[in-house]
Amino acid sequence: MLEKESLRLLDNALDTLEQGFAALPNAPAAPLNQESAAAVMNEVAIRLRDNYPYFHPLYAGQMLKPPHPIARAAYALATWINPNNHALDGGRASSQMEKEGVAQIAAMFGWKQHLGHLCSGGTMANLEALWVAGQLQPGKKILASDQAHYTHSRISSVLGLPFALVPSNHCAHMDVHALATMLKARDVGCVVATMGTTGTGSVDSLAEILRLREEYGFRLHVDAAYGGYFTLAGNLVADTRASFDLIGKADSIVIDPHKHGLQPYGCGCVLFRDANVGAIYKHESPYTYFTSGELHLGEISLECSRPGASAVALWATMRLLPLVHGGEFAGMLENCREAAVELHRRLAQDPRWLVPFAPELDIVVWAPRARSASEVSARSQRIFDAAAKYGLHLALIRLPIRFFSGATDASEPDTNTVLCLRSVLMKPEHRAWLPRLWELLSRAADRTA
């Protein structure tokens, strides 16, 4: 079940890499005690068994997806050099690959000019975007939907910026009417729009938010850490498609290649439409920026040491699978979306379940019907546990009960939130495995009825 073909790629590539340094005097590698190392590696492998089968299609829970084989092999190959993409001294080739890779991501959103770099993940990428917003509009408030990732609130606190949540509507989108009301105080410096919330996969309406930007002059930051790559998918519904088509009008964008971009953790990316924001990062280093007059990536990043291996893996993956509409990579995203649409169709037609809204990307949330909100939560937990015993691994999420109108037989809910079931169908194979997933879910539901 575990992919091993990339080991052959790695073996051959190591020989090619070594040939590039053939002119050096011989310096034998440090000896490795094969017997001891083998024992340790065997122990590591046994320890790693204590995980859910994240790589398998029957894992349909959290946002965990195996890297593409070429990403895995390229990342491993780069570790023999172990480049540091802070300064060109530490990673000439990998820094150039990072610049080329980031440019391809920016081009996916229609940006020919940009400033950007890779980060350790979405949290750091969002931190940089909000830091720049705070530098440009000091002391002003950051706004994000109550369904946005919790990291925005935490980051704002770290940056010493005021923060407030905008209520969501019945589809888990930012309520633009509530946003308009909050903007009237004219104390907002940045609004965060989420293109694919990590809870429900919901996509905020960019057209409405952009109209408000024209009136109030705030910075628009698009958190597309999860959903950004779906801009290449050809099977989004019209409203969702319209929002994705407007991402390029944002002031900053975050996307995570280690989610749908087929990369190992951690690999995030932050992009700025105006390259002049690079002046905000400006600093001097007494020892790292002297070998080249070209841009050192550490000059436009809050992080210092950064793994060049991440850039190498991303570059190799996009070389094999270009970020183009109608391409193989786009087809993978479309398969994920089709899996979510099919699961939603089956749930919506089955009287045992209530689904609050159709999936916009590849995340589906649903709840079992019950007499009270508390019983809905209890049943969700029982189904989650039962499904795992059948080999189907789902996820749980607590959402406002208002998303689930009609979920209970009671006229008044006994709690304001409800624990419900959630699946992130982010593996392309999920489309073919959907009948098996449905069979196991039905069995778990019947067992706990």
Image (cartoon, helix red, strand yellow):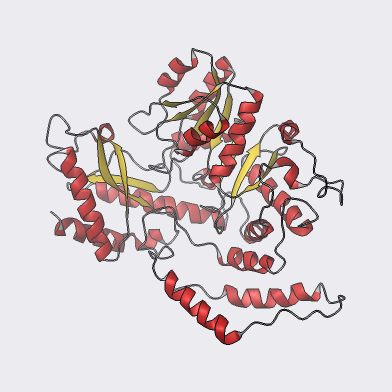
Residue 325 position, x and y percent, is 58, 49
As rendered, which of 91 and 332 lies closer to the eye? 91
Q: Is residue 249 above or below residue 269?
A: above
Residue 366 position, x and y percent, is 28, 45
Q: Is residue 71 left or right of residue 91?
A: left
Residue 449 position, x and y percent, is 13, 54
Q: Is residue 76 above or below residue 104?
A: below
Residue drawn at the location 35% of the way across and 28% of the way down: 169
Q: Is residue 40 left or right of residue 10?
A: left
Residue 30 image-quadrant placement: bottom right
Q: Can residue 110 be seen in this snapshot?
A: no
Residue drawn at the location 49% of the way across and 12% of the way down: 184
Q: Is residue 251 left or right of residue 390?
A: right
Residue 55 position, x and y percent, is 44, 65
Q: Please state, as top left, top right, bottom left or bottom right, where the N terminus lies in the image.
A: bottom left
Q: Is residue 402 left or right of residue 60?
A: left
Residue 389 image-quadrant placement: bottom left
Residue 64 image-quadrant placement: bottom left
